[in-house]
Amino acid sequence: MTEQPFIKVRGLTRTFGNFTAVDNIDLDINRGELFVLLGGSGCGKTTLLRMLAGFETPDAGSIEIDGADMAQTPPYSRPVNMMFQSYALFPHMSVEKNVAYGLKRDGVDRAQIKLRVGEMLQMVEMQDFAKRKPHQLSGGQRQRVALARSLIKKPKVLLLDEPLGALDKRLREQTQFELMELQDKLGTTFVVVTHDQEEAMTLATRIAVMEGGRFMQIGTPAEVYETPATKFVANFVGSVNMIDGVVTSCQPGLVDVKTKQGAVTLQAQSRDEHAVGSEVSIAVRPEKIIIQKTRPETEPETPNVLHGTVKELAYLGRLSTLRVETDAGFIVEVTSPNTTRHSDGKHPFEWDDEVYISFPAASAVVLIA
Amino acid sequence: MSGAGPQRSTFLLSCLCFGFAFLYIPILLMIVYSFNHSKLLPVWGGFSFRWYVTLFNSPDVWAATVLSLKIALINATVATFFGTLAGLALARFTRFPGRTLFTGMISAPLVMPEVITGLSLLLLFITLQQLIGWPGNRGMSTITIAHITFSMAYIAIIIQSRLANSDLSLEEAALDLGAKPFRVMADITLPLLAPGMMAGWLLAFTLSLDDLVIASFVAGPGSTTLPMLIYSRIRLGLKPDINALATLLVLAVAIGVLIAGWILIRNQRLRKP
Ligand SMILES: Nc1ncnc2c1ncn2[C@@H]1O[C@H](COP(=O)(O)OP(=O)(O)OP(=O)(O)O)[C@@H](O)[C@H]1O
Ligand SMILES: [Mg+2]
């Protein structure tokens, strides 16, 4: 017996005038998942979330949550709570009252409300601020209150619209882990919107990459990163070298591609069939490329070895990013970890160094141009 | 350019001083003369509360004051209620046909010459009297209704602009937490509007308190408001007790406006964290 998806979205569409913000989307989210919607600005993430919460009426399609169709259910009766991008804390109520609001509306008795609000504030470590008003809190504290308020009713699904958007980098990273811990502890299904790919990778059990109101790819962070389905996904999630070329041969699992620039042959693994002569791109992540001063001792027929010169070099502390101009003419970005300490300021590579770069065919992905 | 800066600013500054002097010296003069012991206006006869005492002992001044205050109170309260509803309708229930027309129309009473407003209301009351026999005689009720019509427009606009600038997600958050629309209105929208409503109430109160033109049109015999009383006394010649009365009126209006401004500013600071 296969388990029914907890959230089941079919053919969901929302248009504003003649602009389609969400375009015929199908989506299955399982119980207890931490599902991340990742996409650039204006791609329809918020609109999709608002349809799940019931603030936006779909033009077509259906939403089912835990087996119940949501079409006729107003926002105040949905088993869903939302944490707003702006937090939307009620400015005229204290922290305590904000958090208690949902329970009050449900008619929970006072003693019970007091108890649960206390527990919830404890959980987000805001118990000392119960009497304060939202404008007396810092950004991070407000974020915690908003989280507490949206969790107090123990919703089946929690929707979070850029929950960490207003926090600085350090606090953000710390909060990411707290959020994951919390989700793990409560077992609530989380749907998180973000435009930050690192955040998506950190948080998600699965990621949906969105563009122009559609899903480009849905998968685990590793799937999305290692085997991007399209050039957009490859570019959006992490940085990537995209080398255009034409397929010259396609044996099972291995594709040979002659690059447009320089006409060198590169090899990549691929599960799909590619017709000889079709235009493709080879995508390689910068950290999967090995950079050396001497020619690597590989089998002579291994094609993915290129000679070039270092054109740019950026020292980023933990690693360095190098841009290497190959003899074939195209530029390849390489990151190399700084495993040893060079206190004299000398780096293993310098500008205009002659280098060899190489990558195994398994590290490259063939994407249709 | 850089040389013109300070020069221009001295010029602007003197303009400003002149403007303010023009505005406030007459009022200051009036206040000063209200404490003048002498009966003759331009002669300073020493400081005294004489005219205030005269004022408190004249029954028609008392009657007019009570009438004006009554009208102002009822007007402010009723206009705040309906003006708030109108502002809510204009700002929140966005997609009804002819909304733009309504928005435009609600501000019409603000720019309409008072004479026109007064005249048209008078016509309305006369017509009504012939059709349904009400209002039997014009007086406090007709003045109050007339004041409500224009005060409402001011309040509707204050409320509408507050709502237009406010964060819709607050109301959505309340909905999301299980509050039905009416509950959202009571718990979130109205509390957030309260400062606007208070300011509006004070504004309506003062507008009503110093209206002369519209009240004159729709008043009947025996219903003399304070501004009407002042105006009629002036026509009989300047008398110092009127200065005292006007000074008190200025004081009342100034306090009202200051409190309204204070409420609005304080609230803005609270809301911008
Ligand atoms: N009420 C509306 N009326 C008209 N267009 C809208 C409305 N709401 C959203 N849109 C449009 O729909 C598109 C998607 O908006 P949405 O808010 O879902 O984007 P988003 O992915 O959340 O972007 P961001 O990361 O910037 O928040 C945008 O182009 C936006 O202009
Ligand atoms: Mg958004």
Image (cartoon, coloured by chain):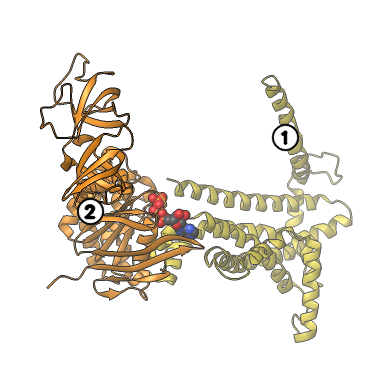
Q: Chain of mark 1?
A: B
Q: Are marks 1 and 2 on the same chain?
A: no
Question: Secondary structure beneath disc 1?
Answer: helix
Q: Chain of mark 2?
A: A
Q: Quadrant of residue A216?
A: bottom left
- Residue A137: % across, % down: 34, 45
Judge by depth and name the residue closer to the eye, B62 or B195: B195
Q: Quadrant of the N terminus of chain B?
A: top right
| Residue at x 77%, y 45% (from the top left corner) | B30
- Residue B19: % across, % down: 75, 38
Q: On the picture, is A57 further left or further right than B200?
A: left
Q: Colour of chain B?
A: yellow
Q: Amino acid at mark 2?
A: Glu
Q: Amino acid at mark 1?
A: Leu
Residue A90 visible in the shown view: no
| Residue at x 46%, y 64% (from the top left corner) | A15
View extreme (right): residue:
B236
| Residue at x 44%, y 71% (from the top left corner) | B182
Q: Which residue is mark 2?
A: A273
Q: On the picture, is B192 further left or further right than A61?
A: right
Q: Which residue is mark 1?
A: B16
Residue A127 visible in the shown view: yes
- Residue A284: % across, % down: 24, 39
Q: Which chain is orange?
A: A
Q: Quadrant of the C terminus of chain B?
A: top left
